Amino acid sequence: MSFMNDALASAIAGSLTDEIFRSKPNETRKPASAERLRSLGESYLIANSYNPGELLQWKEGLKDAKWPDYSEPVVVLEVAPGRRSSGTDSDNHHNEPADIRVGVLHNESKHGQMLYGYWMDSNRFEPYTEPAAAAAPVDTADGTPMTEQPQPMDAPVPDQADATE
């Protein structure tokens, strides 16, 4: 019975792998440029050492998992230098580096946001950078931000009674 289960599981895994990697007829895949491949390869090879508690984000072009999104920070939970994934031969992450465990927030309907841990390849991450704050609206007349517009010294102060009319 075990042989049948193993054979069935192997066949299903092989079918799923074939389905995932088979091009769809209406899919237009752009061929990779040599320059882009070199650039991503160089980025991957830049190794960083991380410590628990640090916030990280994906390096551009190196996201290989559904979570987290590119703009979403993760927190380092554990560091295990030299650790490798233990997936099956049909798993495209089989025996790849998985040397940091990162915490990702997922929305749970019952409990709100919950922290989930995933083993990942540290070479695909970089320190998290906060998104830049939105720029203040600019007055096109003189180019100064509207929040810094000088107020005339002799401007009348509105009367409370005028405001309710």
Image: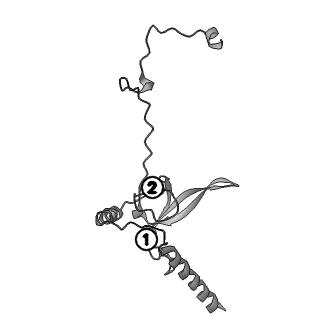
Q: Quadrant where the C terminus lies?
A: top right
Is the residue 54 above or below the residue 135 in the image? below
Residue under numbered circle 1: 97
Sequence-earlier tag: 1 or 2: 2
* Identity, as a three-letter code, of the amino acid under mark 1: Pro
**Along the viewing direction, whichever of 142 and 109 lies nearer the viewer:** 142
Q: Residue at x 58, y 82 (%)?
A: 12
In the rendered image, the vertical position of residue 7 relative to residue 67, given as above or below:
below
Quadrant (top left/top right/bottom left/bottom right) for the N terminus: bottom right
Q: Position of residue 74 (x, y in %)?
A: 50, 55
Helix, strand or loop status at disc 2: strand
Nearest the viewer among 54 and 67 is 67
Estimate the x, y position of residue 76 in percent, counting from the top left.
49, 58
- Type of residue at label 2? Gln
Give the quadrant of residue 63: bottom left
Tell which residue pokes out farthest to the front in this image. 26
Can you tell which mark lies on residue 57? 2
Based on the displayed image, in which of its 4 quarters is residue 47 positioned?
bottom left
Q: Secondary structure at mark 1?
A: loop
x and y, in percent, of residue 126 in the image: 40, 56
Q: CA distance from mark 1 to mark 2?
A: 17 Å
User: Above or below — where is 139 with respect to 24?
Assistant: above
Q: Give the mark toward the camera: 1 or 2.
A: 2
Where in the figure is residue 143, as x and y percent of width and height? 36, 26
